[in-house]
Amino acid sequence: MDNYIKNQTLEHLTKAQNITIAVSQNSGFDGLAAGLALYLSTKKLGKNASILANPPTVEDAKMLYGVDKIGKPEGKQNLVVVVDNAVKNVEKVTYFLDEDRLRIVIHSFPGSKGTAKEDISYEETASKPDLIFAIGFNSINELRNEVTHEQIINPDTWTISINKNEMSQKFAQANVHEHQAASISEITATLIQNLALPVDEDIAFNLYSGISHATEMFSPSYSRPSSFEAALWLVKFGAGKASLAARATQQPSFASLEGQTYHAGSSITKVTSPPSEELTKKPAPPDMIDRQETQIEEVEVKEKSQEAWLKPPKIYRGSKSFDSES
């Protein structure tokens, strides 16, 4: 992003009240982590932010902040009048003002049964955004068809496209792409850094999680130098201090496992404290008894005084040896 595009983006970001973050489902966990980080950052700016994305899996949701805000528009809402069976019954719709009241007239086709009260319902939709972050999209058609309605995509709306892949069609006013990057999250971290957007522990942890996931826990085969640079910057902003970071590294103790029941197929195993030594002690085989008695005899010899060493050694052959001699 050159200085002119950067300054234009900052100007539109400052003026914008309604911001939409749209995340492509093809961007996976990495894209969602980046989108939620931008959502939380723009919320800290005091903006009416909304994030549009596919809901994550239960396991992924445990590793990201802000997942409960997905698909929930904020700020001013537009009221939508929904008419069922409109194709068969509605010819046209007109409206006029009656003093300070707006009257909407639904004209029926001649010979149709018309529109009844039961055919009318109401919905709310978000206002058109003043600025859009498009994450992981390759074309405007993909953006329109996948996550949002076409009516909110205005060509004049300042759009920032974030992607690490080559796009088939450039549709945004600001394109933030780096095909050499290992993840969308590290590109987003750099963008947040360059635009001086707010960062806290939750935002840093989301981006760190996205980079870690995309690089297979920072495997050398998938990581880039920029991956480690972004991770270092995020750690400085408290990624490791987030509550989810502590939960991710917490290991269950044996004390917490005691008394819990685990199911493995059809069998049930209850983990309890280790049984006492007396309960687990098994009778030793005959040959082991002989060895143990011999060892006891040796201990007795060791405990004798020094004078006892001058006497002939004591020999214990065991009962079997006597039987063989007889």
Image (tube, helix red, strand yellow):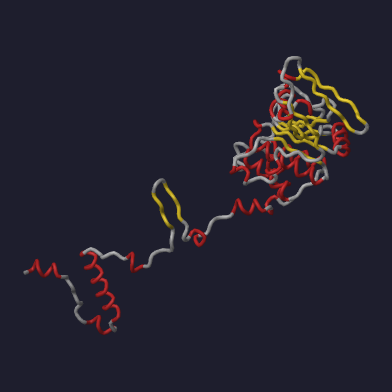
Q: Is residue 200 above or below residue 216?
A: below
Q: Position of residue 252 (x, y in %)?
A: 53, 56
Q: Quadrant of residue 79?
A: top right
Q: Position of residue 214 (x, y in %)?
A: 63, 38
Q: As displayed, is residue 170 above or below residue 314?
A: above
Q: Is residue 220 left or right of residue 11?
A: left
Location of residue 186 (image quadrant): top right
Q: Which image quarter is the N terminus in?
A: top right
Horizontal side of 242 relative to 157 (left or right) equals: left
For the point 23% across and 68% down, the residue is 289
User: Can you give x and y, in whole percent of width and height, for residue 236 in the image?
Assistant: 73, 51
The extreme top residue here reads: 110
Q: Is residue 182 shown above or below 265?
A: above
Please give the name of the residue rendered at 29% of the width and 76% of the height, measured from the top-left corner: 299
Q: Residue at x 62, y 40 (%)?
A: 213
Between 18 and 41, the one lying in front of the other is 18
Look at 24% across and 65% down and name the residue there: 288
Residue 276 appears anywhere in the view? yes
